[in-house]
Image (cartoon, rainbow, N blue to C red):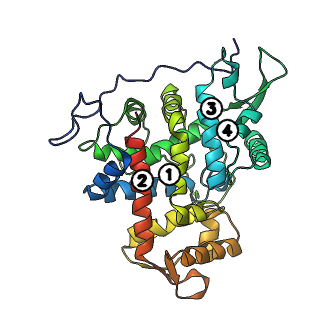
Amino acid sequence: MNALVQRPDRLDTTAQPAKPAGGCIATGSTARPDRTAVMANLLAHPAFSDARKAIIANLTQLFRGDYLLSRLLLEEGRYLTIQTLLHLAAGQQAEERETWLTLGRLQARLAGSELASRNRIEALVAILERYSFLERRKAEEDLRVTLLLPTPRLWGCDAVLAEAMVQPLALFRDIHQPGPALCSLLTRTRVGGSAFVAPPDTGPGFDPQVPAWSNRDLATAGAGHRAWHRALSPHIDTYFALRAAHPQIQGLAARDGGYLTFLLLLGEVEQTGCARLCLPFETLSSHTGVSRTHARLLMEQAEASGFIKLHAKGGRDVEVLPALHQAADAWFADLMAFVLTLD
C-alpha cells in the first residue's frame, strides 16, 4: 500500500458539545436548520459582535506582515485551490486509484473556475513545492503516476487558519449544536480566548510587523484536522458558491493584499472606536506586502465599492462607511452559519 495515500480516519465523536440552553436544538435532534435561518439567529445573537471581533483579530495577527502566508492563504484564487487540494488529500485512499491526488485531478476538480485556471494551478503547485508546503512523489503502485503530497507545514498553517475562524463559534453553543467534525476541531483548538498563536521569536528587538517571507511552522495538524476536511468535502461547491455570493468582498480578496486590507480596516475601527482613520498607504503596504501603488489601488477599489471614503491623499484620512460593516456582518454570519450547519 502506498504510504503517501492515507485511509480516512473515523470522525472523532468522543467530544460532547455543551448542553444547549432552553429553546435551543435538543441534544437528540437529527434535524439541521437551513443556513439562512442559522444566519439570522447569529446576527441577532448578543455574542455575534464578539465572535466577529475575535475572528478579525485572529486573522490580522496571523497574517499581518507575513507576505508568504497572506498571499497563499488569503488571495481568493490561491485560497480556493489550496482548500481543494487539502480536501482531495484528506479523502484519498490507496485502494481507489480515482481518489489519488495528482495535478491533473486537482485541475479537473477546479475546471471552469475563473479564479484558478489550469496554468495558474500548475504555477501555484510549483510555488507550494518551492516553499516546502507540498511534495511530489511517485505512487508506489504505479510509478508512472506522480502524487501531490501536502507537507505537515501546509497542514499546520491551514489548521491554525481554520481554528482562527472556527474557535469563536463556541460562543454560539446556546443556539446551535456543532456537528461531530466541528466538535472535533473545537476540542483540538490551540486558540485560547482572544489571544492567538504567539510569534516564534519574541526576544529583544523583535518587531512582529516587519514583513518577511514566512519560515514559520505554526502548528502540527492531527487527524482531527483531516477529518474536518473530509466533512467539508461534500459541501465544497456550496462553500465556493457562498463565497461568490459576496462579490464586493471577493473583488478585494481576488487581489494580493485585498482581504487583509478589508480585515485591517475593520480591525482599526474596532480598536479606535472611530469611523475616521489614518491608514497611510505606506503603512498598508508594509502590513500586506504589496507596493504603495498597489495599496492605493486597493483603497480606491474599497472606495468604489462604497466601503470607505478617502478624504485626504495617501490614506491619511479614511472614513469607514456603514456599508463596510453591513457587508462584513453578512459575510461573517454566512461563513459561521455554513460551518455550524455542517453534518
Rounded to the nearest angstrom, the CA distance separating label 2 from label 1 is 8 Å
According to the picture, the residue beneath numbered tag 1 turns out to be 242
The answer to which of marks 2 and 4 sits earlier in the sequence is 4
According to the picture, the residue beneath numbered tag 4 turns out to be 109
Location of residue 139 by image quarter: top right
Residue farthest left in this picture? 22
According to the picture, the residue beneath numbered tag 3 turns out to be 88
Residue at x 66% of width, y 55% of height: 71
Image location (x, y in percent) of residue 278: 50, 79
Q: Relative to residue 95, is residue 100 depicted above or below?
A: below
Query: Of the residues tagged 1 and 3, which is closer to the observer?
Result: 1
Query: Of the residues tagged 2 and 4, which is closer to the observer?
Result: 4
Rounded to the nearest angstrom, the CA distance separating label 4 from label 3 is 9 Å
User: Residue 293: in sight, yes or no?
Assistant: yes
Query: Of the residues tagged 4 and 3, which is closer to the observer?
Result: 4
Secondary structure type for disc 4: helix
Rounded to the nearest angstrom, the CA distance separating label 1 from label 3 is 20 Å
